[in-house]
Image (cartoon, rainbow, N blue to C red):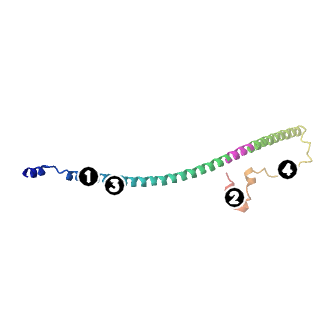
Amino acid sequence: MASTAARSRRTLNVWPGYVDALATLLLSVVFLLTVFVVGQFFLSQELTGRDETLAKLNRQIADLTDLLALERSSRRTQEDEVRNLRTTLAGVEAERDRAKTQAEAATVSQGAAGALEQATGGRAGCDQAGPVPDRPAERADQRDAPPARSLGGRARRLREP
């Protein structure tokens, strides 16, 4: 009996070590699971914020695209208007040049008529001429200015160069 009692004391009891290992393993798994859950929560919050920001940026892009299309159509309209104005300007300049040429031709013909009149001694058209004015011709800026009496003494100062 003594030998059986000694043998029973010498046997290894593995259960306490086994329980400690399982408890440690369980605590480690729970800790890792907690870390992953917290990480997942923060990542989902970050992605939700990014989705909202991405939606906001997409709305801004759509607005800017609409604005760009509007500006392009406005630019095309303005280019067409400029093209029309240039065409009109070219026509008006051509008309002005024709009128200028006609005026120069008329001036030349009047000068030739005046030279002819001087050559004949001024006899032609004497009866048609009106009386000669007593005062010399006014300056162009004085002709266009309003009368001095309507503005008082200030008008004289304004007209003087």
Q: Secondary structure at mark 2?
A: helix
Mark 1 and mark 3 in contact (Cβ < 8 Å)? no
Residue 39 or 96: which is nearer the viewer? 39
Which mark is on residue 34?
3
Left or right? Give the position of 56 relative to 96: left
Q: Secondary structure at mark 1?
A: helix
- CA gap between label 4 and label 3 equals 118 Å
Does label 4 or label 1 sit earlier along the sequence? 1
Q: Which residue is mark 4?
A: 132
> Please, what is the dominant secondary structure of the magenta stretch?
helix
Residue 110 or 83: which is nearer the viewer? 83
Vertical side of 119 occupied by 41: above or below: below
Residue type at mark 3 is: Thr
Residue 23 painted magenta: no
Which mark is on residue 155?
2
Q: Which residue is mark 1?
A: 22
Vertical side of 25 occupied by 95: above or below: above
Residue type at mark 1 is: Leu
Residue type at mark 2 is: Ala
- CA gap between label 2 and label 1 equals 113 Å
- CA gap between label 2 and label 3 equals 95 Å
Vertical side of 153 occupied by 89: above or below: above
Counting the numbered discs, the total is: 4
At a point 85% along the width and 50% down the height, the residue shown is 132
Q: Secondary structure at mark 4?
A: loop
Q: Local crowd at mark 1 within 10 Å, few (<14), some, or many (≥20)? A: few
Give the foreground label among 3 and 1. Answer: 1
